[in-house]
Image: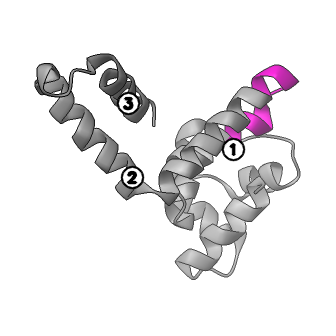
Amino acid sequence: MDINAYLDQAKVHQGLSSDNQLSKRIGISQATISQMRTGRSWPGDATMVRIAELAGIDAREALLDLSMWRCRDTASRSVYQALMKDLKRSLRGPATAAGIAAISLTALSNPTATGSLNVEHQKADMVYIM
């Protein structure tokens, strides 16, 4: 998605018919929306979170997209893309993440029961990163 898709989805999700109405809902000027739409400026992080909320999109995904759009080097962009892939995987399977968290917490609270604290600790770290 690009910034225009976010803005358009926010309008649809909120039942708004114009960028002017959207700008008031976000709390920015209509000129600022125009600058974002034409690529002359990017929203700040707080504005991007607000746009995501209005669009019904996870704010974590929106902030990663924003970081990718603003990123100028390919090495950093590939890191953001990997983070996005991990985030989307976790969003598709929240029950899986919750299951791993429950197993990890159980194992960490009683490491002698499983005998595999290191593996369970790695799982707990993975859940924290998600």
**Crowdedness of circle 1 by 10 Å Cα count: few (<14), some, many (20+)?**
many
- The picture places residue 46, in percent across and down from the top left corner, at 52, 41
- Residue 124, by quadrant, is top left
Marks 1 and 2, the one that precedes in the sequence: 1
Write the start and end of the magenta stretch as one range.
Answer: 65-77
- The picture places residue 129, in percent across and down from the top left corner, at 45, 30
- Residue 103, by quadrant, is top left
- Residue type of the residue flagged with mark 2: Thr
Q: Quick check: 13 left or right of 119?
A: right
Q: Which label was assigned to residue 10?
A: none
* Mark 2 lies on residue: 96
**Crowdedness of circle 3 by 10 Å Cα count: few (<14), some, many (20+)?**
some
Tell me which residue sits at (78%, 54%) in the image: 2
Q: Secondary structure at mark 1?
A: helix
Q: Is residue 84 above or below residue 24?
A: above
Q: CA distance from mark 1 to mark 3?
A: 26 Å
Q: Quick check: 129 left or right of 82?
A: left
Tell me which residue sits at (19%, 24%) in the image: 108
Q: Which label was assigned to residue 123?
A: 3
- Queried whether the magenta region covers residue 69, the answer comes back as yes
Q: Are the residues flagged by discs 1 and 2 in contact, CB closer than 8 Å?
A: no
Choose between 50 and 86: the one closer to the eye.
86
Q: Secondary structure at mark 3?
A: helix
* Mark 1 lies on residue: 65
Marks 3 and 2, the one that precedes in the sequence: 2
- Residue type of the residue flagged with mark 1: Asp
